[in-house]
Amino acid sequence: MSTASPRRILIVDDERIVADTLSLVFKTKGYEVTTAYDAESALVLSQSLRPEVVIADVMLPGMNGIAFAILMRATYPNCHLLLISGDPATGDVLRDAEAQGHTFEMVAKPCHPSELLARVNATSAPD
């Protein structure tokens, strides 16, 4: 496995200010960043992007971030998934996913972009 940092990141958050700010932060650090504001759009974008890392909010309109992450993991098993949420209801959705055998790395909102950068930098690029 390569030890280089992943380069292609997909950020999914319906709060445009959050998504756009994270996008800017990662772009200034040299990452190729694509932003989506809902899971359905992110799924379409991922087909051409083939992201190495996905940072997704859990509470999204339409398909929630956990259902999205389950689909992404099935389609791109080497993609690193990082879920973010500031909604207390996330715990229930996450427990349901865990009961079905799905576990995900979570970060509570609000989180400083440097924490997300550190987590992404700690991942290895997929083979």
Image (tube, rainbow, N blue to C red):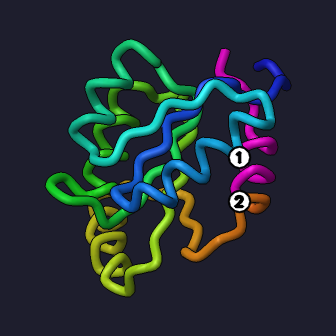
Outermost residue toward the left?
A: 62
Residue range in magenta is 116-127
Residue drawn at point x = 58 percent, y = 31 percent: 33
Task: Report helix, strand or loop for mark 1.
Answer: helix
Q: Is residue 94 magenta?
A: no
Find disc 1 in the rendering and name its residue. 25
Direction bottom: furthest residue: 88
Q: Which mark is residue 113?
A: 2
Magenta stretch: residue 117 in it? Answer: yes
Which amino acid, mark 1?
Answer: Val
Question: Which residue type does callout 2 highlight?
Answer: Pro
Query: Dividing the image into 4 quarters, which one contains the N terminus?
Result: top right
| Residue 42 vertical position relative to residue 64 in the rendered view, above or below | above
Q: How many marks?
A: 2
Left or right: 6 in relation to 65: right
Q: Label 2 crowding class (10 Å Cα cut-off): few <14, some 14-19, many 20+?
A: some
The residue that appears at 46% across and 71% down in the rendered structure is: 85
Q: Is residue 39 above or below residue 127?
A: below
Q: Point out residue 84 in the picture as x, y percentages from the top left corner.
A: 50, 64
Residue 114 picture quarter: bottom right
Q: In the rendered image of this protein, does residue 69 appear above or below residue 48?
A: below
> Element under label 2?
helix
Q: CA distance from mark 2 to mark 1?
A: 7 Å
Callout 2–callout 1 Cβ contact below 8 Å: yes
- Quadrant in the rendering for residue 96: bottom left
Q: Is residue 84 above or below residue 90?
A: above
Q: Nearer the viewer, residue 40 or 74?
A: 40
Residue 100 in picture, x, y percent from top left: 27, 59
Foreground label between 2 and 1: 1
